[in-house]
Image (spheres, rainbow, N blue to C red):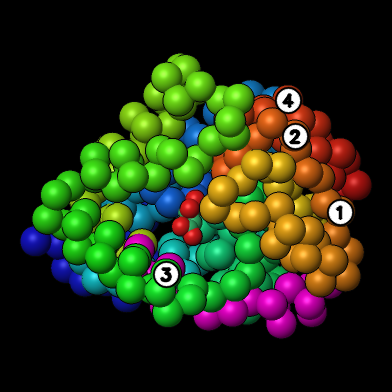
Amino acid sequence: MNQPSTSALKLHHEIHGDGLPVLMIHGFPFDRTIWKSQVAALSSDYRVITPDLRGHGQTPASDGVYTMDLLAHDVLALLDELGVERAVWVGHSMGGYLSMAALRLAPERLMGLALVATHPHADSEDRRIQRIQSAESALENGSANIALSMMSMLFATNTDPKSPTARGVYDIMIEASPEGLNGALRGMAERPESVATLQALSIPALVIAGAEDQIVDVAVAEKMAAMIPQAELVVVPEAGHMVMVEQPDATNEALRRFLSQY
Ligand code: MLT
């Protein structure tokens, strides 16, 4: 059994390109390769850093609850290891939740924030209960059950669930370790509201939303963009929760435009 951990864990990661550091943080239960198209498009001009979060991809799991603070500490420790003082952070879904935790823990480490298919709200009581049930199911039945149950929620209607794109996402999800899923699900269930954090944001922000996202409704993303003092909103048509793999060109164009201000 792994030991429960409350201190930073060394994250497996890739770095491509040189220049302004752009840190791209995947969501649940994905890994760094979810950003493949963004890395290809951005690494000619930027130093793109893509970690695997604790218990995801090639980073080992620990037991216990992965609070968003703990996951943010892992990422901050990676930046320390790489000698990166400040970066533009890009967070997809849970990657956005932990970026909001980083804004509270170490705001000086973020010089910009792109929030992709994410939102600032804590779970409802019902959602919390579901998360704990899923966490128990992950430990009992493994990752495939969770991956299967998520598949119908991840894509826009035009994205064929049998397409290589969708299969690729499924293949990533089934590789996540059950302990990692358990830790992240329990951590998301505990996460606090981040509305006040975003309302006080004083760095440039970009909100990218899939017009057909079934996990983060586009209306929620629009409200989030409106509450951030310096935010641009890009709603990508024919995209669901996995906007960056479903519509990579539109996502890359939005990110490039945002990054060009630095
Ligand atoms: C994610 O993509 O990170 C998850 O769908 C977030 C969540 O379940 O709230």
Q: Is residue 84 left or right of residue 196?
A: left
Q: Residue at x 73, y 73 (%)?
A: 198
Q: Quadrant of residue 106?
A: bottom right
Q: Quadrant of residue 175?
A: top left
Magenta region includes residue 189: yes
- Residue designated by label 1: 232
What's the distance in space between the residues labelled 4 and 1, CA to CA? 18 Å
Amino acid type of disc 3? Arg
Instruction: Please determine whether, in this image, residue 187 is positioned above or below residue 78.
Output: below
Residue 261 in view here: yes
Tell which tag, 4 or 3, sits nearer the viewer. 3
Q: Secondary structure at mark 2?
A: loop
What's the distance in space between the residues labelled 2 and 4, CA to CA? 12 Å
What's the distance in space between the residues labelled 1 and 3, CA to CA? 29 Å
Q: Sequence order check: which comes first, mark 4 or mark 3?
A: 3
Amino acid type of disc 1? Glu
